Amino acid sequence: QVQLVESGGGLVQAGGSLRLSCVASGGFSSANVMGWYRQAPGKQRELVAGIISGERTNYADFVKGRFTISRGNGKGTVYLEMNNLKPEDTAVYYCNLYDVPEVRHYWGQGTQVTVSS
């Protein structure tokens, strides 16, 4: 059973920073893609950033230049450094792991990020 556990969310003022962490455990392939999604109230879940390896990353336009995704040691750790946060970044942030050989997505339980103006 694969489990993803996120941490690092919280309340921050506009212009502030937060760092989200996600650690995956269980049986999954090292051939995976990890990413962060977010969902604001009344909106659909959307991709924030994804990473295959250190230099193979992609970002949503609304976070380019402000957020940085990176991998930690091991095959299932990912971080999201969020700088210059805006009130519109307020959402539940979900960690995602896509197991390429299994063609399967796994999700964390989500962590709340609230940015006050």
Image (cartoon, grey):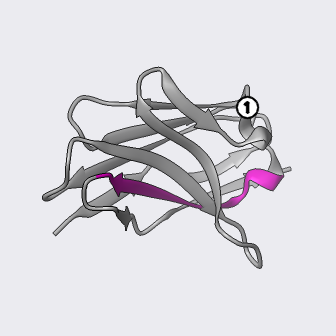
Residue 102 image-quadrant placement: bottom left
What segment carries the magenta color?
88-100
Residue 96 lies within the magenta run: yes
Residue at horizontal 21 percent and vertical 64 percent from the top: 2
Q: Position of residue 79 (x, y in %)?
A: 44, 37
Residue at horizontal 73 percent and vertical 25 percent from the top: 65
Q: Is residue 103 left or right of residue 63?
A: left
Above or below — where is 105 with respect to 36? Answer: below
- Residue annotated with mark 1: 64
Q: For the N terminus, which image quadrant?
A: bottom left
Q: Position of residue 106 (x, y in %)?
A: 35, 64
Above or below — where is 77 with respect to 11? Answer: above
Q: Amino acid at mark 1?
A: Lys
Residue 10 lies within the magenta run: no
Q: Position of residue 8 (x, y in %)?
A: 46, 48
- Under circle 1, the secondary element is loop
Residue farthest toward the top in the current orientation of the protein: 55
Q: Position of residue 52 (x, y in %)?
A: 41, 35
Dominant secondary structure (helix, strand or loop) of the stretch shown in magenta? strand
Q: Is residue 3 left or right of residue 14?
A: left
Residue farthest toward the right in the current orientation of the protein: 117
Q: Is residue 9 visible?
A: no
84 or 44: nearer the viewer: 44
Q: Is residue 42 left or right of residue 24?
A: right
